[in-house]
Amino acid sequence: GQQLNQSPQSMFIQEGEDVSMNCTSSSIFNTWLWYKQDPGEGPVLLIALYKAGELTSNGRLTAQFGITRKDSFLNISASIPSDVGIYFCAGYNQAGTALIFGKGTTLSVSS
Amino acid sequence: GAVVSQHPSRVICKSGTSVKIECRSLDFQATTMFWYRQFPKKSLMLMATSNEGSKATYEQGVEKDKFLINHASLTLSTLTVTSAHPEDSSFYICSASGRTYNEQFFGPGTRLTVL
């Protein structure tokens, strides 16, 4: 079935550094979503991408929908301590009825 | 907008009892609600999808008689874990989508601990 391969699994960075994480798949996705999950909370939608090649920003976050529709990346610029959490990429299954999640990237930021 | 709540946020129960978790969309009509399960440091695993007024569609490997889902209104879905056992302990998260929003919005999750 469809799978999303997310990397890296975890990152340890210093405050102020930029971060990049990505998701790839052998299948085509028509939508790419990036979520952040804080400990003990549900995921919160950060950025939604709907068109191949689309580049979208949300504050210090930037995400791109790959031209092949098989990949996406998320960049965080000038990281701050509250960026700590787990970041998930997600895409809809072929039927468009359910989300498939990547395994997540755990981000740790030291001040 | 697009706020989804869950109740309770935490529940501890004895083995063999049943537990009901509520998921509500507070400011939009959720035509579809989803229930996920998440193990520590793992991704979200979709358990079932429910559309208002119809039976839930369960993912492969999820026991429908154990995890009863009801979606009786456009703002409420419930998940009942029947005859809970310690291996049912997990973080259960619901999400909702509707006519207004194409994306899924997630609730804050419910931590279930079965003793």
Image (cartoon, coloured by chain):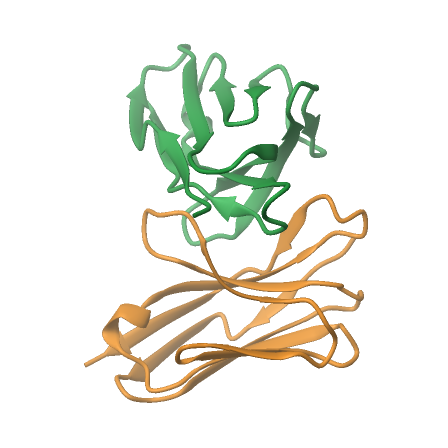
Chain colours: A orange, B green
In the image shown, does B51 or B87 lie closer to the viewer?
B51
Q: Residue at x 52, y 52 (%)?
A: B43
Does B111 appear above or below B77?
below
Which quarter of the rendering shows the C terminus of chain B?
top left
Q: Residue B57: x percent and y percent? A: 71, 28
The reply, left or right, for residue A83 in relation to residue B4 is left
Q: Residue at x 24, y 74 (%)?
A: A81
Q: Residue B72: x percent and y percent? A: 57, 17
In the image shown, does A79 or A25 lie closer to the viewer?
A79
Q: Residue at x 76, y 49 (%)?
A: A96
Residue A38, visible in the rendered structure: yes
Q: Residue A89: x percent and y percent? A: 57, 64
Does B58 appear above or below A24?
above
Q: Residue at x 38, y 15 (%)?
A: B15
Q: For residue B51, what is the image quadrant? A: top right
The reply, left or right, for residue B110 in relation to residue B68 is left
Q: How many marks?
A: 0
The reply, left or right, for residue A20 in relation to residue B51 is left
Does A43 appear above or below B45?
below
Q: For residue A92, what is the image quadrant? A: bottom right
Residue B70, visible in the rendered structure: no
Q: Residue A62: x percent and y percent? A: 50, 80
